[in-house]
Image (spheres, rainbow, N blue to C red):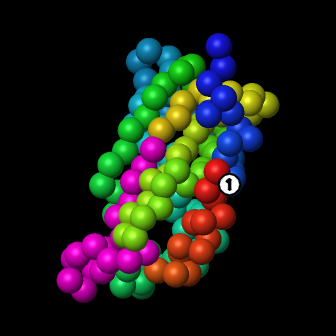
Amino acid sequence: MKDSAHLKNNYRYFREFTTRWNDNDHYGHMNNSHYYAYFDSTIGQYLMNECNLSIKKDQVVGYVVHSQCNYVNSVAYPDELIVGLRVNKIGNSSVEYGLAIFKKGEEEASAHGTFTHVYVDRRVNQSTAIPEKVRSRLENLKV
């Protein structure tokens, strides 16, 4: 039975990746740590390219405070992947992203999960409001 919440049309931004030989583990499928790397890279690309966030220069940046992943179907080298991104919830200083990994050509996620960022002012190392330049673009990812 398909989980309609994790079909490709429920995501708003996509990034393509090609698995690498060293992504596979001893069991012959992609090691779980690589799913998180693909999730993190997709969020980072969106924030830098679409929200003009400078992770090295901006005083307010998002720190990951929670992440989780559900594995549905195995992914392995040489699979071509598409990572989908959406915003599940947005608050004053935090955002929960929804992410999914799809094998190229498939509509149902092979894995799906969440990342939560809390935006922090680096000068005082405390949470702060999500910058407007980021918030307005994140709103576009809400489903």
Residue 18 is left or right of residue 128, and the answer is right
The residue at the point 45 percent across, 44 percent down is 114
Q: Where does the magenta region start and end?
A: 114-130
Q: Quadrant of residue 130?
A: bottom left
Task: Find residue 66 and report its horizontal and vertical position in percent.
Answer: 32, 49
The residue at the point 58 percent across, 39 percent down is 100
The quarter of the picture where the N terminus appears is: top right
Tally of marks: 1
Task: Find residue 94 and report its horizontal and vertical position in percent.
Answer: 39, 63
Q: Nearer the viewer, residue 44 or 22?
A: 44
Question: In the displayed structure, would residue 106 be above or below residue 132?
Answer: above
Dot 1 amino acid type: Tyr
Q: Quadrant of residue 93?
A: bottom left
The residue at the point 61 percent across, 71 percent down is 137
Q: Nearer the viewer, residue 118 or 43?
A: 118
Question: In the displayed structure, would residue 123 be above or below residue 76?
Answer: below
Q: Nearer the viewer, residue 113 or 73?
A: 113
Q: Nearer the viewer, residue 11 or 81?
A: 11
Residue 41, visible in the rendered structure: no
Question: In the displayed structure, would residue 27 be above or below residue 91?
Answer: above
Task: Find residue 2 and report its horizontal and vertical position in percent.
Answer: 66, 20
The residue at the point 44 percent across, 15 percent down is 27
Residue wearing tag 1: 13
Query: Magenta stretch containing residue 42, yes or no?
Result: no
Query: Magenta stretch containing residue 121, yes or no?
Result: yes
Residue 140 is left or right of residue 27, and the answer is right
SS at mark 1? strand
Task: Find residue 142 and report its horizontal and vertical position in percent.
Answer: 61, 56
Residue 119 is left or right of residue 4, and the answer is left
Residue 91, visible in the rendered structure: yes
10 Å crowding of disc 1: few (<14), some (14-19), many (20+):
some
